[in-house]
Image (cartoon, helix red, strand yellow):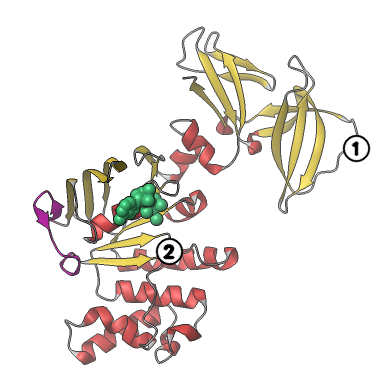
Amino acid sequence: MKGLAVEHVTHTFGDKRTLCDVSLTVKPGELVCLLGPSGCGKTTLLRLAAGLEGLQVGRITIGADTVAAPGVNVPPEKRGVGLMFQDFALFPHLSILDNVMFGLEGLKADEAQRRAMAMLDRVGMADFANAYAHTLSGGQQQRVALARALAPRPRVMLLDEPFSDLDTTLRAQVREETVAILKESGPATLLVTHDPEEAMAMADRIKVMDGEGRIVQAGTPEEIYFSPANSYVASLFGKLNRMTGTVKAEQVKTPLGTVSAKGFADGADVEILVRPEGIGFAESGAPVEVAEARLLGRRSQLRLRSRGSDDGHEFVAHVQGGFRHSGDCPAAVSLDPAHTFVFART
Ligand SMILES: Nc1ncnc2c1ncn2[C@@H]1O[C@H](COP(=O)(O)OP(=O)(O)O)[C@@H](O)[C@H]1O
Ligand SMILES: [Mg+2]
């Protein structure tokens, strides 16, 4: 296939298994995010794809070429890979233009300069061509690093948590620009991150890894968010309300109402997970009292206490905007099925 393919890669440091049978493909022009907790092997996978780490088990292909397999190890500079790592700093002793020209030694000087300037122009940094890295802000350095990685027109771009040093406001903007530039340039892009929001904001497809270096779910951002494969994936996006119950006629009763449990057998022990945004006030719902309300900014976090059959059970709910509550005013809530998940208890 065109683009990048990682097939059945397993990697061990000493006796510690870091990657476990990882397979993924990224088509040209596509952006795939590998999302996993710190230490699960994300950087190791990128280093293997780039040729900075020797492959032990599996195969990596770029375009029609096998670049890594047992007995095969194409050197990094022959792989057509662009890298943007968190600690992949710009050369401080070179101008911005020379930084971007660095990967273009193969070209004639005037052609290299023309291409580097075009790339700097594309990332909005042409005016800084003669500046030095230390005079630029974090976001500007990030743009130059992207220009430097893309200038040689790599077939594959590998990005390792590239925005984690940027502050929140800047991060969102740089992310957006980066996606636009990558889409326009067209390499197969694999980005690794531990930040679910980053993966959601940038990816065409997400691969979720667990702490053991295993891919546990693959899908579009919508699939990962609305149809998580297990409680681990469901809880990536923040703390959930957890309840347990027993299935009867493909339904399960909870203190906040009856939940559909399609496909589960009668008597199955299940775990019911509800996102805080999945609990909403409803005219006729399960009775609760609001124990506490806290304004978080755009939304409020409420601590709810159930007043029904399972008296005293506490829940966390998020509602848009501010929330005013007067002492012991009674309320009722219902569950949004889009944010309610049922999994077998193991
Ligand atoms: N060169 C190495 N030698 C030994 N252990 C390593 C080496 N590189 C990474 N590790 C270990 O492998 C695991 C995965 O590391 P890494 O790929 O950096 O994870 P991530 O990028 O997901 O945080 C960690 O436990 C790390 O300590
Ligand atoms: Mg890492």
What residue is rendered at 27% in x and 88% in y? 113
What residue is rendered at 57% in x and 24% in y? 272
Amino acid at pointer 1: Ser
Q: Is 73 displayed left or right of 303 in the figure?
A: left
In the image, which disc is placed on residue 162? Answer: 2
Q: Which label lies toward us, 2 or 1?
A: 2
What residue is rendered at 31% in x and 68% in y? 185
Amino acid at pointer 2: Pro
Image location of residue 81, percent across then percent down: 24, 65
In the image, which disc is placed on residue 85? Answer: none
- The stretch in magenta equals 64-79
Image location of residue 162, percent across then percent down: 43, 64
Q: Is residue 308 on the magenta stretch?
A: no
Q: What is the distance, in whole Å, between disc 2 and disc 1 at their CAs?
A: 46 Å
Q: Quadrant of ligand 2?
A: bottom left
Q: Relative to the observer, which residue lies in front, 265 or 40?
A: 40
Q: Is 256 displayed left or right of 73 in the figure?
A: right
Image location of residue 69, percent across then percent down: 13, 50
Which residue in the structure is indicated by mark 1? 326
